[in-house]
Amino acid sequence: MIKKHAKNILIIAVFALIVISPQIYSHSLILGSDSLFHFNRFYDMASQINDHNWQYFVSMYGFTQSGRIVNAIYGPLLAYLHGFILWITRSWFLYQIISNFMVMFIAGCMMYYLLIQNKVSQRYLMPLSTLYMLSYVIFTWTISQQFLSWGAAILPLGVSVATRLVREKDNPVNILEMTLAVTLMLQTHVLSSLLLIILLTIFFIIAILQSADKKRFLLRTLIAALCTIFLTANIWGSFLEVYMGNQLIPPFKNKTPQSRGSVAFPIDNLKLFFPYVLLFGYQIFMTLMHWRHTTLVIRTVTIIGTICLVLSSSIIPWNTLFKIHFISLFQFPYRLLPTAIVLLLLGLGLTLTTSDYLLFNKKQLSLILITSMICILANNIGIVHKKAAIWHTPKVLADKNKIHQDATKTTIRQSFYANKRLHVLLDSVWKPTSDYLPVNGAKRVKEPYKKYNEQIARQQYTFVKYVENKKLYILWYATKPNYKTINVIKYAHTRLKLNGKPLSAYDYQLTKIGAVKVRSKVGENVMQLSYQPAKWFMNLMTVNKLAWFILACYTIYVTYQRIKKVVRDKSHFGARV
């Protein structure tokens, strides 16, 4: 059985490599809609590792060394992982190949784990895992660098926790599994974690109603919740640290979500390729037709999966609904698509495994799944080939939405090959994303992208910047004593010095996006920027690190005990033989 699982995992890895093979062959970089935003995040982390300058909050290397806060409230631990890969490879190309492979491989393995935990038949494990790995919600990292994919890759682990609540009446709560699932999701993608928590709540309500030992059920859930709170203290602590003293610019508001952010109905050849529509249609049909003969798990995952699928589509009048502020924060309805795909693929696997009322025999069903898998694989390879080919054309960039460049196409391509000078690419082309900048004075900033481009991004050559002793230094020359806007961002706990003198709130002005304006002296001027979080946050981080240490020790212990049990069982079996 172990050899069979290892073989299937190897096949998943091979499929992931096949998908990105056109990019490897053409030696191309795919710069999609979100690539430059995330590249700046990971370059900042790679530089921190290289210089041993750990700056949890402000960016002293990425984002034109502007001192803005991004990583602390946007998957910090995963950002460090990406930064580590970039630091090791010293190449944007190698980094992108490794990260593209990783997200697909992790997604495939997590889906495989989910199917095993729910006792799906061996013959369907590999096809269904690969179908999830090849879906748009995972594949979109490769072609446009949407971070949604990393949350989607971990989602099956969370769904495994949810189905266990309903499936395992004697032991519905595995504390370690529940803690890890929610913790990893929170450390990766906060919005995806909120959706997972909603999903877990639905399954929790169903499970508690049928539980024979409600006291034990609630106690184990509470322990998992407390463990998760300690392990994610860096996340919610960062939000408190930043939001308690600042009003931040939220991510952009999508005014046309039905056309820019939802699955086109009835078929969307990018977000929901037609084989998925056929497979999901089959699963929904079989569940409805044989409702009385299906298990509670199948009914639950199919109903919730179908609801999420409908909500992610353009059928819903999202353009109207997004006029309500708190709904518009969701940005893209297709963020519900990962949940829909995981649940419906799981439901399909369970139906094929347990149902006696199938329209096809086992061999035919396996053939249908493999054929679907090959069709989707071929489609994805074609898309990667097309996206990768753009790098070698005059266009260079796979997506130019709101992207600015300060170099020729040839220079941009050459900067890609400057292995040890990773910043060259980021200096040549950028996207002036204004998310998480502090708002000064006004409740709403008009044209924040434009302001950020003018005040921060476009001014990168106006100043000389360097990092020393864990502080960012900004140098410029002035011919007369006048006010100058410096392209750095000031948050409540940002500390500034000008020419050796600490600045109080009376010594500087702030633009609407938090850029600092100071009065220069004639000659050389030096500004020093650092960040000093609240003392309570530093204490909280100590607790967080201790929690991770305890989790690591406990995980090693549990793993050792399981390996020991397997070895003991094998030796006993050999003795009997």
Image (tube, rainbow, N blue to C red):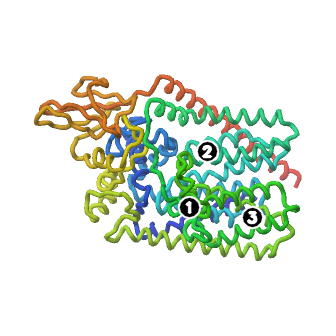
At which x and y percent is residue 397? Answer: 37, 64
Is label 1 or label 3 in front?
A: 1
Q: Mark 2 points at which residue?
A: 194
Question: Which residue was labeled with disc 1?
Answer: 262
Q: Indicate the secondary structure of the residue bearing disc 2.
A: helix
Q: Give the quadrant of the N terminus.
A: bottom right
Image position, residue 523 (x, y; %): 12, 33
Viewer-closest of 119 and 526: 526
Work out how far the residue at label 3 is from the one at label 2, CA to CA, in angstroms: 25 Å
Badge 3: residue crowd in 10 Å (few <14, some 14–19, many ≥20): many
Q: At 40% from the left edge and 65% from the top edge, which residue is drawn?
A: 398
> Disc 3 residue type?
Leu
Q: Is residue 467 visible?
A: no
Residue of label 3: 348
Q: In this view, does 34 lie above or below 361?
A: above
Q: Which amino acid does label 1 sit on?
A: Ser
**Residue contact at pointers 2 and 1, CB within 8 angstroms:** no
User: Picture quarter containing residue 26?
Assistant: bottom left
Q: Is residue 174 left or right of residue 269?
A: right
Find the distance from the CA under tag 1 to the CA under tag 3.
Answer: 23 Å
State if disc 3 and disc 1 touch (CB < 8 Å): no
Find residue 10 and report its image quarter: bottom right
Q: Position of residue 376 (x, y in %)?
A: 59, 71
Q: In the rendering, which numbered label is found on residue 299?
A: none
Q: Is mark 1 on a helix, strand or loop?
A: loop
**Which one is closest to the eye, mark 2 or mark 1?**
1
Measured in 3D between alpha carbons, the distance from the residue under mark 2 to the one under mark 1, in whole angstroms, is 19 Å
Q: Which amino acid does label 2 sit on?
A: Leu
Q: In which quadrant is the C terminus drawn?
A: bottom right
